[in-house]
Amino acid sequence: MSWDLDTFIERLYRKQLLSEGVVKELCEKTKEILVREGNVAQVSAPVTLVGDVHGQFYDVLEIFKIGGWAPFTNYVFLGDYVDRGYYSVETITLLTCLKLRWPDRITLVRGNHESRAVTQTYGFYTECMRKYGNANVWTYFTDLFDYLVLSVVIDDTIFCVHGGLSPSIHTIDQIRVIDRFREIPHEGAMADLVWSDPISTPSFASLGGGTDEKGDFAISPRGAGYLFGKEVTRKFLEVNGMGHICRAHQLCMEGYQILFDDMLSTVWSAPNYCYRAGNMASVLEIGPELRRYFNVFGPCPDQDRDAPGRDAPGSSGDLTAHYPETGDEEGAGGNQWRRKKAARKLVPGALRDPLEIDDSELTAVTGGGITKVVAEYFL
Amino acid sequence: MLAQPGSPFTSGWIESSLDANHNLKSNRMTSVEQQIAANGTLYALLDSLTCGEVIKDQDPAANKLGARPQHPLCLDSELSVSEGCEALAANRITSAPVYDANKGGFIGMLDYRDLVAFVLSVLHKVPKDPSPVDVSMDVTDIVKRALVNKSEVPIKLVSNLSHSNPLIPVQASASIRVAVEEFVRNHVHRVVVLQPENDTAHFAGILSQSAVAALVASRVGKLAGAADPTAKSMWATGNKTLQELGLVGKDIISVIPDDTVLEGLYMMHEHKISSVAIVERTEQGDNQLVGSISMTDIKAILADRKGWRRLYERAFDFFTSMRFEQGLEAGGDDRIPTFTVHPETTLIATIEKMAATRGHRVWVVEGSRAVGVVSLSDIMPLLLK
């Protein structure tokens, strides 16, 4: 097969697997791009943040339908691409292709599931064995995971990471000097960034583990990382001149959660997690002037997806219409966004007075005309 | 409050509590903690609390994993094995005393070791036949075949079957040190706390090694070695490494990923341990730790009528299915597959990790190479040093 990234992406949108040889080449080429990125990627708004997707491929397509297709929307994915869902391979292969194709539009952050030990336990390894008959693809991707960045800063204001904070990290510069090109260790700064969780209860004493003197950190019941409180969050933001922390890593029944007087938020992007949790999901859309919208959505309707385990080639139809050579802005609906089951949640404390915002300004959020939805097929 | 010259409070430790500007330094050390720092032992802590006080403080709504029972749970001796197992699992406890109404008293404890011993003994009694696995059978059917005239085995026959869990009572007014001494002397994981009322002893609750470890972690743990690499606990022994304390280098009882769950349970029963490691042997002859199976996992087998056939699953597949379910039960918070420490980890950091994860052991690794295991039973004697 000749090397044609656009064709690969087209096939992946149809949930068709790429060959082992192509996956190997894909990972090699993507490593070359990632190796040049620092541990803290700098990104500008407008951009959409995506939380855990965990191999829920059809719901990843929902994200693109709702948030806009690459490259017309900038995306930062906050990790946990694989494990638990039925289509981890298709999901990570698609995201890797998108990164390779548009490296400046897609940022991939490492989550705690982008790890050899974790993927052997929670499903990705098994899925690779089942779909390819051997562990090579698993090896290619887990080697690639060693190259994913650890965090993102959006316009020097919003700090993004998969898990949370670390008692070993006070400044963002300390993150920059970590050697990230390795398996995630069980402890230390790198482990903490992908495993930690915020805790909102005031009392740490009930947790049983050791706490530090001000009750800011507690050892996490997950067995790696820490639980961290409001004071630690405030201090981190102050010391680093940031305004907000956005992270993923924890299931939110409503798709997102805002904590610590809006100093921190969690975004979760796998609806009906494990096909049984019954939760909503969201993506965080950050507009110019850093306005934040949690775009909430539900799972892809059952009639639009195959039964797990049954791959029907071509059943998702031809999705190349959204993949034009030129940015065709006069497509169906013009600049209108069409959303399925979407709800806009205006974050309190946004920089603009909410009463001033009306619908016609919404389309301007993404810079006017750079988002296109191919409506006919999906409606 | 500044110490005035000539006041009874002028003493060495007050002066050391003042900073350069003679302001009282913020000082959380209570007198108990000061004694620990001074004497180097935990007796000050262990003697300062009674068993009754500690079990009362056990917070029933502490974690996402579900509330512990508000009232201490006893099991009737006539309950069947599956009912007893369901009761343990539903209440998220690992053992309960068994009360015999006819005898009017406690006859023993039921815990997972007993259930494992029961399953092993029953399966051993099943005669070998050409088609050994009949998926339509459940445990009670097996019992029917194995024991004549009994359709449901009452737990009074099962409790203490493992001979490893005698009922050890302590008075609610006894200090925690007494409980720890009982843990060590009798090799038990928990004691029954009795509150005398008039002439009878009223069952007040169960005090476990886990509860004591959590107490130690919260009082003398200071995230030793984490927030600040030089931060030390006030408990001298706690600052020693596992290597220094001789806790590394014990042989690890293990199975390979392809072994069955039944073989894992058998290893636990034979060696009288509560968890077995799952290791992969590398070409260099190292044991890479990839997972573990615990005694308490048997509840997933016995609580479900058809669950017994899981005994024949691959150990590693069983382990991953346990983690899968545990993550969902914890509200979607997946855990790291194995809880590990290093030979250079301090004792107090090890205790803190066990308390935070509510685990009963941690595996000692170098890289991913398994080199030892430290359990709560290993730690209890050190609390008395």
Image: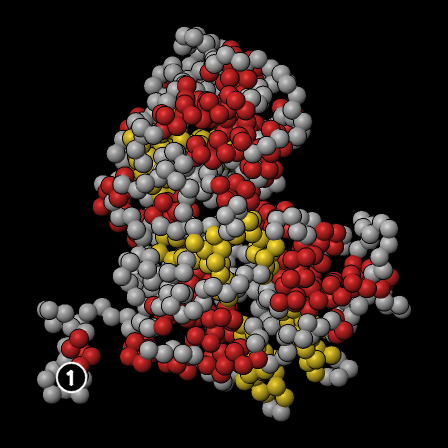
The vertical placement of B189 against A129, above or below, is below
Q: Which residue is mark 1?
A: B10
The vertical placement of B302 against B173, above or below, is above
Q: Is residue A283 visible to the viewer in this orientation of the structure?
A: yes
Q: Position of residue B66 (x, y in %)?
A: 56, 58
Within the image, what quadrant is residue A357 found in? top left
Q: Position of residue B70 (x, y in %)?
A: 57, 68
Within the image, what quadrant is residue A159 found in? top left
The vertical placement of A314 against B77, above or below, is above
Q: Position of residue B88 (x, y in %)?
A: 65, 64
Q: Position of residue A207 (x, y in %)?
A: 44, 61
Front residue of B371 and A263? B371
Residue at the spot x=84%, y=57% of the render? B128
The vertical placement of A37 against B289, above or below, is above
Amino acid at the residue labelled 1: Thr
For mark 1, give the secondary structure: loop
Residue at the far bottom in the pictured view: B199
Residue at the far right in the pictured view: B149
Q: Is residue B75 left or right of residue B132?
A: left
Q: Residues within 10 Å of mark 1 (few under 14, many from 20)?
A: few
Residue at the spot x=49%, y=61% of the render? B372
Residue at the spot x=41%, y=58% of the render? B342
Residue at the far front in the pictured view: B284
Q: Is residue B90 left or right of residue B181?
A: right
- For the C terminus of chain A, the quadrant is top right
